[in-house]
Amino acid sequence: MLLLLVAGLVTTDVLTSSSLRSFLLGRLDEQIDVSQNQAYAYITSVYQRDVKAGDRTAVTDPGAWLAGPVLTGADEEPDMTQVLAVLGDGVTEAPVIDTAAALAEIAHAQVRRISLAGDLSAEQAAAQVLGALDSPGTVLAVLARDERSRPIWRRVAQRSARPVVLVPAAARGRRAEIRRVLLPLDGTAESAAAVAGAVEQFARAGVDLVALHVFDAETVPRFWDQAAHAGRAWAEEFLARYCAQPGVRLELRTGVPAEHVLDGAEGKAADMIALGWSQQLDPGRARTVRRAVLDAVVPVMLVPMAPG
């Protein structure tokens, strides 16, 4: 077909070589203009979307923003899954970025960074993060858990409908991979349902899952001082009811749940703790969550329970 076209051009002398060159260059200029206009419109729309969602990087550091998902094409997919890395303090940024990257790998997602301006109030900063969390495709947010930013991460964790991962300063220098996750389960359907999605995601990625249930004086079962086979049967029933994912191991303890969560995370070399919670921090509520968040040396994933 190409040979016929060339032959036709030669025999009919429709276009001379110079006019053909001018014609092609003109078409090329038109295509470049169209592509530039499309690129400009695309970048403008992404910029406006990110600014509206509270991403200050687009304003404070346009070069870094352009080098991110804008030019890599991550924003071309409207359903692209994203893990939000919330940055605000250079000292704590590395553990947040590393944790977000590890979770993104598990979720087959992109990491989207947003920077919190230093002049924002805690309420404004939390609103910025929550706005970004509401963006389509965003599955969770990762924030630094330090005393200075406590008013921010506390607001976000209590109001977010999606999981929030809090990274302590002690995580700096630890391995970034998430190979083992500790799953404290209180034996209620609500807390089990809250973490079920995360458990499934971790399991698909080959993460070692260790469930932990702690009895107190009122809930300790009769088998506790009896034969081991009774305990195994109880554990199998517990997992079948509250964490039926194959391969999950169950650890049983008695005493104060928060202490065993912290000891279990260290003793089992867990890289993360995943907790379902009611998002209530009233006096007498969420003691285990409070201790885990404040004292754990590994990131803590807080997954909100369904309302009611």
Image (cartoon, grey):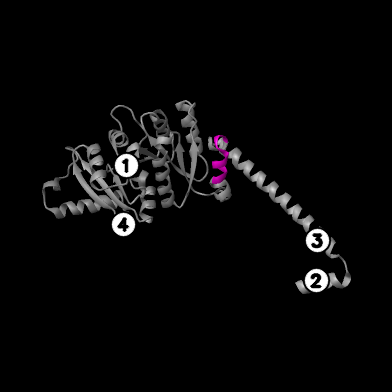
Q: Of marks 1 and 2, which one's residue comes earlier in the chain?
A: 2
Residue 308 visible in the picture: no
Name the residue carrying label 3: 21
- Relative to 147, does residue 9 appear above or below in the rendering? below
Taking the image as shown, residue 96 lies to the left or right of residue 183, namely right
Which one is closest to the eye, mark 3 or mark 4?
A: 3
- Boundaries of the magenta span: 59-67
Q: Count all numbered tags in the image, as a single digit.
A: 4
| Tag of residue 181 | none
Answer with the quarter of the image where residue 282 lies: top left
Which one is closest to the eye, mark 2 or mark 3?
A: 3
Name the residue carrying label 4: 246
Helix, strand, or loop for circle 2? helix
Helix, strand, or loop for circle 1? loop
Q: CA distance from mark 1 to mark 4?
A: 25 Å
- C-beta proximity under 8 Å, tags 2 and 3: no
| Tag of residue 298 | 1
Q: CA distance from mark 4 to mark 2?
A: 66 Å
Helix, strand, or loop for circle 4? loop
Q: CA distance from mark 2 to mark 3?
A: 14 Å
Q: Of marks 4 and 2, which one's residue comes earlier in the chain?
A: 2
